[in-house]
């Protein structure tokens, strides 16, 4: 997946250079100001449906949106739903002989709200972005324990395996979590009003309401919960459409005249 993300960044950089070449306006214009576009951009995260095509144990969908409020600053939101069946196994066991401890399914929704700040200085008429951002996120979900084995260091009665757990499938509801995210990303206008974006995210878990007898090992929107750490990582690749609502004059940089000797 890291190779795929790296390839996407190279493609985005290529599209950025192409867009700069195609968008360069050589016509005579006002040298002091020009109208910048403001509006709403809405889209969908491509990584989740693509992941679902290759992973039968996962399904998810995320919608994204941002609204420009100043030249550099955007307010942003993401809303999604994920369902994933996971297996927890003992460490230091090879794949052929691994011992499964838990098989569980997590399902729920999440909402992320925050801001993006564009650090890229566009040429005239461009609206590409290399941005940094932050999100406050919350998730509401449930977990179903499909089956489990009982970890027991005394292997007298079951020398070759752990004893299977007893009882029917257990479902744990009314679970929730919240976290903070910081992110870095790039956004490129491929053609009129259509944008391709990619970002990487570092998350820090703030609250985590768990069931009494089963921990939250995976959280929709946050991904895997690590032992002894509140940090998590994520990514997204989005396609979005910009809906222009109005234009606002912005200052345009003047070219410096060469000094005469």
Image (tube, rainbow, N blue to C red):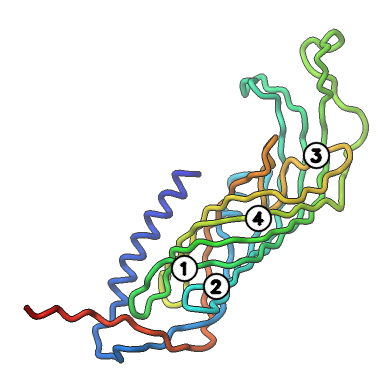
Give the side of residue 5 with respect to residue 225, left or right.
Answer: left
Q: Residue placed farthest to the right in the image?
A: 167
Which residue is denoted by mark 1 in the rendering? 118
Badge number at residue 180: 4
| Residue 176 horizontal side relative to residue 224, left or right | right
Mark 4 and mark 1 lie on one chain; the one further toward the N terminus is 1
Say whether marks 2 and 1 touch (CB < 8 Å). yes
**Where does the image place residue 150, in percent across and percent down from the top left?**
84, 24
Q: Nearer the viewer, mark 4 or mark 3?
A: 4
Q: Disc 4, disc 3: CB below 8 Å?
A: no
For disc 2, the marked residue is 74
- Crowd around label 1: few <14 · some 14–19 · many ≥20 (10 Å): many
Q: Rounded to the nearest whole Å, what is the CA distance between mark 2 and mark 4?
A: 18 Å
Closest to the observer: 72 or 50?
Answer: 72
The Cα atoms of the two marked residues, 2 and 1, are separated by 8 Å
Residue found at the far front of this picture: 261
Mark 2 lies on a secondary structure that is: strand
User: In the rendered image, which quarter is residue 79 located in?
Assistant: bottom right
Q: Earlier in the sequence, mark 2 or mark 4?
A: 2
Disc with the residue nearer the chain's start (4 vs 3):
4
| Label 4, label 3: how far apart the Cα atoms are | 20 Å
Callout 2: few (<14), some (14-19), or many (20+) C-alpha neighbours within 10 Å?
many
Tell me if residue 140 comes above or below residue 77 in the rendering. above
Of mark 2 and mark 3, the one earlier in the sequence is 2
Q: Secondary structure at mark 3?
A: loop
Say which residue appears at 36% left-offset and 65% top-offset.
Answer: 16
Which residue carries the number 3 mark? Answer: 215
Residue drawn at (80%, 10%) of the image: 159
| Residue 180 position within the rendered picture, expressed as x and y whole percent measured from the top left | 65, 55
Q: Residue at image x 40%, y 67%? A: 120
| Residues at marks 2 and 3, CA–CA distance in whole angstroms | 36 Å
């Amino acid at each position: 997946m890291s190779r795929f993300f790296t390839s996407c960044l190279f493609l985005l950089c290529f599209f950025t250079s192409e867009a700069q070449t195609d968008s360069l306006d050589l016509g005579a214009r006002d040298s002091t100001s020009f109208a910048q576009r403001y509006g709403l951009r809405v889209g969908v995260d491509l990584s989740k449906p693509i992941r679902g095509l290759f992973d039968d144990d996962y399904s998810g969908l995320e919608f994204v949106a941002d609204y420009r409020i100043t030249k550099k600053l955007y307010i942003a939101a993401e809303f999604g739903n994920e369902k994933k069946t996971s297996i927890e196994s003992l460490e230091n066991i090879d794949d052929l002989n691994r011992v499964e401890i838990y098989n569980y399914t997590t399902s729920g929704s999440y909402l992320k709200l925050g801001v993006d700040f564009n650090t890229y200085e566009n040429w005239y008429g461009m609206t590409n972005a290399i941005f940094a951002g932050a999100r406050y996120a919350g998730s509401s979900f449930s977990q179903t324990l499909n089956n489990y084995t009982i970890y027991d260091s005394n292997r007298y009665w079951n020398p070759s395996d752990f004893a299977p757990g007893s009882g029917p499938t257990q479902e744990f509801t009314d679970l929730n979590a919240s976290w903070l995210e910081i992110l870095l990303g790039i956004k490129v206008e491929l053609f009129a009003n259509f944008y391709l974006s990619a970002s990487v995210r570092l998350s820090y878990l703030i609250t985590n309401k768990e069931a009494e007898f089963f921990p939250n090992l995976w959280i929709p929107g946050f991904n895997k919960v690590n032992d002894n750490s509140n940090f998590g990582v994520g990514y997204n690749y989005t396609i979005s459409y910009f809906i222009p609502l109005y234009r606002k004059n912005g200052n345009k940089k003047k070219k410096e005249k060469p000094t005469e000797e």
